[in-house]
Each structure stands twice: as C-alpha cells, then as structure tokens.
Image: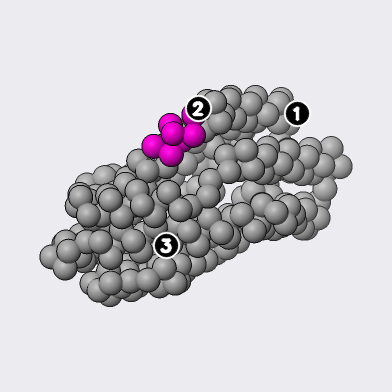
Amino acid sequence: MGLALVLQGCSVVKLAYNQAPELLYWRFDSYIDFTEAQAPRAREELARFAQWHRNTQLPEYITLLQKVQQTVANPAEAPQVCALFDQARGKVAAMTQQIEPAVVWLTSNVSTEQLQHLERKYTKTNTEWRQEWLDVSPQAAQKKRYEFFVKRAELVYENLQDTQKAALQARLAQTSFDAQMIYAERLRNQQDQLQTLRRIAQEKLAPPQAQEVLRDYLARSLSSPNAQYRRYQEQAIAQGCAVFSAIHNAASPAHRQQAVTRLKGYEDDLRALLAP
C-alpha cells in the first residue's frame, strides 16, 4: 500500500484499499506459502498494518497530494518533482518499521520448505523479468519504457497531449537504462534476503537478534552495497524527475488545470476512506 495505489481512480481506490489486507495476504502467500498454523497470524498482522496505514498514512498522503496540486498548477522543474518524489519515498521507512515485528515473527518460524518455495518463486519471476527486459532488442526495451512513463503520467493527466508525448520521447532518448545492471542488483538482493532468512532460521536467533539482522538486510536493500549501482540508481531517479518535468511543462495551461482537478479527486477519495 502506498501513494501509487491511491492514484488509480475513485472506485478502484476504494475497492482495492478496503481489500488490501486480503490482497497482500495472497501476494505474500505466493512467495512464502504460509502454513495452516501461520495463516491466521499472518492475516491478523496484515489487518493490523492496514488499519495503522489508514489511520496514520492516509492523512500524510492527503497533505502530499495537496503539495502536488500546487506544483502541477504551474510549470515545474526537475528538482521540484524530485522533492515530491523524496517525500513519497520517505514513507517507506515508516511502513517498514510498523511491519517489522510481524516480519521478525514470520522469519523466526520459516521452514526449509518455505525458503525453497521462495527461491523457486524468484527463479520464475527472474525468468519473466529477463524475457521482458533483457531478451529483447534495445528498441523494444525503449518502447516499454515509453509505455511505462505514459501509464504513470496518465494517472495525473488522464490523457497525454501530443506535445507531452513528443517531449517524453525526446527526454527519454537522453536517459540511460542498464537492464543488465538492474538485473544483477535484483539477483544480489534476492540472494541476500535468502541468506538472511536462512541464518535466522538455522541459528534460531532470538527476536532481538533477528530484528537486528533484518534491519541490516533492509539497509542493504534500500542502499545497495554496490557503489556503482547506487550511482546508477540516483542518476535514474534524477533522470526520471527530468522526464516528468518535461511531460508536465509540455502540457497546456488548461491541461495542467485538468490535472489539478484530477489530483483533487484523489484527495477526496482518500478523505472518503478516512471517514468513519
């Protein structure tokens, strides 16, 4: 659950958000394969997390959406876009801290069979990722990136104008994309996670020690130990901000105002979710 979820349209927002605990359960289950004994506790923890998120995070999303409305009402440069992105990215730490006790409980009770299931799941999703991004021509990958940015931008603008699409294509051609580096970091992070879980399970670490080990892993997950990848990631974020700035500034004043109205609708949706 995050800001991306709420930018999906009124009826979808309410339906998805209200069903989030169940949707999250089935997503996690596809990776870890909960046992019958684990399932009730997992559902309880996710329901508790969802309620915390509704009570504490939605008000912050409303505030952030108000800032976004103020930004898109006028031309905006890349640093302004990145400032908003950093605020949204900062919500991850709070969510991670909230769900941490449940993760400690689960990892302290994970079985060898579940870890094997997780590894098989990663093998499957990695094959799909390679087919989508690595086993294609540079032109096909560039097309997919273009479609990705269009889809994200249309959450705000609904339909991009021709001037916006042209600006997107021009700016995107100036950005770098290293699918091999992204894939290598993906594999590194997955192996790091599997090794962390195996250590907790095999050494039967007590909750305080398990919590510390998990925090160390999360730190490596959020900030890769690979300095080259960290530089690439920061560059990609900066370039992404420049792309969205170009899309926004290519919009007509009337189209920008439509975006403000659309964002206000998202804000109203969140207020409705907060209502008793």
Q: Which residues are magenta?
A: 136-143
Q: Secondary structure at mark 2?
A: loop
Q: Is residue 139 magenta?
A: yes
The percent position of residue 181, horizontal first and vertical second, equals 64, 43
Mark 1 lies on residue: 112
Mark 3 lies on residue: 242
Q: Secondary structure at mark 1?
A: helix
Q: Secondary structure at mark 3?
A: helix
Mark 2 lies on residue: 136
The percent position of residue 16, horizontal first and vertical second, equals 33, 44
Residue 22 makes an appearance in the image:
no
**Given the current orientation, which residue lies at the most extreme right position?**
203
Q: Is residue 229 magenta?
A: no
The three-letter amino acid code for the residue at tag 3 is: Ala
Gap in Å between the C-alphas at discs 1 and 3?
Answer: 45 Å
- Crowding around mark 2 (Cα neighbors within 10 Å: few <14, some 14 to 19, many 20+) is few
The percent position of residue 65, horizontal first and vertical second, equals 32, 67
Tell which circle, 1 or 2, labels the residue nearer the N-terminal end: 1
Residue at point 75%, 28% (across, down): 112
